[in-house]
Image (tube, rainbow, N blue to C red):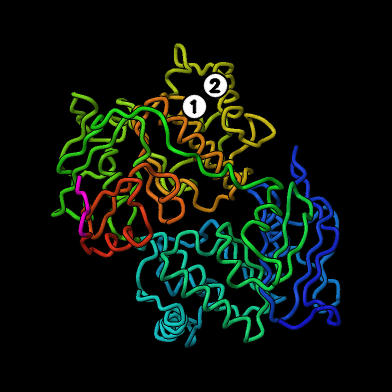
């Protein structure tokens, strides 16, 4: 990248402050972005990254500060204003419409039309969408219903939508959080291509290796303030972590420990609607963290949802100790203290318009009622205990969950189930879109649960997470378990060999 010292920035955000009820989200934050530059924006959940970008994207209005583009002050008070200044935004939380097809989502509100009746030109919109999908190496039809796509493919549709705007400034907020390794590589290559074409990119990611690869500069935020900047030759994993959290990274992974009771939880011949002809059987020890690895579409989530009673097409049985558990619905699983922390926390893990208190007590509401009336003081007491135990950063138990950062929302989901004393808990992508500090706290909670005798099962697409957190790793490919690795055998190569369906010479199958 060229030296910026003698150039005016394309974008300058000066003294940006934003206050929400009870929370100072941003305090006099500055940010500069130059032409043909990729700026990595990092910070813990709640540091203010997304808030700053939502101000640039016209979603929020700052309480103080100003924005300059091409050295001229501009007013951005709506998404339309941002688009008018050639600013595109790929959001962390998906903003696609599930009941509309892919092409319709990409060009929503900008559909090409024809004829006197101004009907949508289906041939043209599909051709335009196909061109963008091809650029992303995405093999899906423009006419496919978005509701039928995987989360990873929905994320790619969101990216295609942003690319369709021909933006000069492109904001990417955790764009790879739901993508496979191959899709991530494609996207990172595209980022570099866009930079060469003159696009400036603000790239938010908790996957610091991505920033190591593509960022020209890295800007850190901490507690709503500027924490510092790293130039290209200063960027490293350790320096980025220190910029974000201001503390040593040695404590981020919790070593396994405690006693195990092998075979405490058993799954036998379990199938899912996604792979009805593939039976899955495995054991999980009381006191261990059993990781489930595999590529997107391997069937990990589907088999766990089947065991939780969400898949009516499933067969097989599960048992805890010597007790066979009949599960035909999620209520059956919950009644036997088998809980699922879902992959998409906003869609299926939380009621975002409800408060922290309401979300934590919702699954066990009968325990907080008498004669049909909710005992609010008892609810508040339990919610407050979970907030303290999990370090949920919110003004109070009455804060709407929608106002919390992604990491704190995930902790609310954990608090909901931890308050009900689980025997088996399944985490599906527990740290997706969460910063390294919050990850460490969630790993600590998982390890504490295991050492208290809870069976902890973790699905993760993050290879580093799988290898460092799991006591054993079960690997799936096309609906079946291809091998179970002890901790000493958990290497990236072994996991990937099993994930693509290849056999290991000395693999152990559960």
Q: Quadrant of the C terminus?
A: top left
Identify residue for label 2. 382
The quarter of the picture where residue 16 lies is: bottom right
Q: Left or right: where does residue 205 sit relative to residue 343?
A: right
Identify residue for label 1. 361
Q: Position of residue 249 (x, y in %)?
A: 61, 47
Q: Residue furthest top?
A: 371
Secondary structure, mark 2, is helix
**Magenta segment:** 505-510
The main secondary structure of the magenta stretch is: loop
The quarter of the picture where residue 80 lies is: bottom right
Secondary structure, mark 1, is helix
Residue at left offset 69%, top offset 61%:
53
Local crowd at mark 1 within 10 Å, few (<14), some, or many (≥20)?
A: many
Given residues 26 and 78, the one toward you in this image is: 26
Magenta span has 189? no
Discs 2, 1 touching: Cβ within 8 Å:
yes
């Amino acid at each position: 990248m060229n030296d910026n010292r003698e150039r005016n920035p394309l974008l300058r955000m000066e003294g940006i402050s934003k206050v929400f009820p009870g929370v100072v989200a941003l305090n006099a934050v500055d940010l500069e972005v130059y032409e043909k530059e990729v700026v990595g924006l990092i910070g813990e959940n709640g540091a203010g990254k997304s808030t700053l970008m939502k101000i640039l994207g016209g979603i929020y209005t700052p309480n103080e500060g100003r924005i300059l583009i091409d050295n001229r002050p501009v007013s951005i008070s709506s998404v339309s204003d941002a688009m008018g200044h050639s600013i595109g935004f790929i959001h962390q939380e998906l903003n696609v419409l599930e009941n509309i097809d892919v092409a319709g989502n990409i060009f929503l509100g900008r559909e090409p039309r024809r004829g006197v009746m101004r009907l949508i030109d289906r041939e043209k919109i599909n051709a335009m969408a196909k061109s963008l999908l091809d650029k992303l190496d995405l093999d899906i039809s423009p006419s496919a219903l978005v509701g039928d796509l995987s989360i990873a493919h929905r994320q790619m549709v969101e990216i295609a939508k942003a690319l369709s705007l021909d933006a000069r400034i492109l904001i990417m907020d955790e764009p790879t959080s739901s993508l496979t390794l191959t899709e991530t590589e494609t996207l990172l290559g595209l980022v570099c291509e866009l930079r060469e074409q003159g696009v400036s990119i603000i790239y938010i990611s908790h996957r610091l290796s991505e920033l190591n690869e593509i960022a020209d500069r890295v800007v850190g935020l901490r507690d709503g303030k500027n924490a510092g900047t790293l130039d290209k030759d200063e960027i490293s994993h350790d320096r980025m972590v220190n910029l974000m959290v201001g503390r040593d990274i040695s404590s981020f992974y919790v070593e396994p420990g405690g006693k195990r009771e092998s075979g405490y939880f058993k799954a036998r011949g379990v199938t899912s609607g996604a792979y009805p002809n593939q039976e899955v059987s495995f054991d999980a020890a009381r006191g261990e963290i059993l990781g489930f690895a595999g590529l997107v579409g391997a069937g990990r989530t589907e088999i766990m949802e089947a065991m939780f009673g969400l898949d009516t097409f499933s067969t097989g049985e599960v048992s805890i100790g010597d007790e066979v558990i009949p599960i035909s619905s999620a209520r059956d699983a919950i009644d036997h203290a088998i809980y699922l922390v879902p992959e998409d926390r906003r869609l299926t893990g939380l009621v975002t318009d409800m408060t922290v208190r309401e979300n934590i007590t919702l699954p066990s509401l009968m325990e907080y009622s008498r004669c049909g009336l909710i005992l609010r003081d008892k609810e508040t007491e339990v919610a407050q205990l979970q907030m303290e135990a999990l370090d949920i950063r919110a003004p109070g138990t009455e804060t709407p969950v929608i106002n919390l950062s992604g990491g704190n929302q995930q902790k609310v989901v954990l608090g909901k189930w931890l308050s009900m004393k689980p025997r088996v808990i399944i985490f599906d992508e527990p740290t997706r879109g969460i910063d390294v500090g919050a990850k460490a706290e969630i790993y600590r909670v998982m390890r504490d649960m295991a050492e208290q005798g809870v069976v902890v099962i973790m699905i993760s697409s993050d290879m580093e997470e799988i290898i460092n957190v799991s006591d054993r790793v079960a690997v799936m490919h096309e609906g079946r378990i291809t091998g179970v690795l002890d901790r000493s055998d958990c290497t990236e190569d072994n996991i990937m060999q099993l994930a693509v369906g290849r056999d290991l010479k000395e693999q152990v199958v559960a």
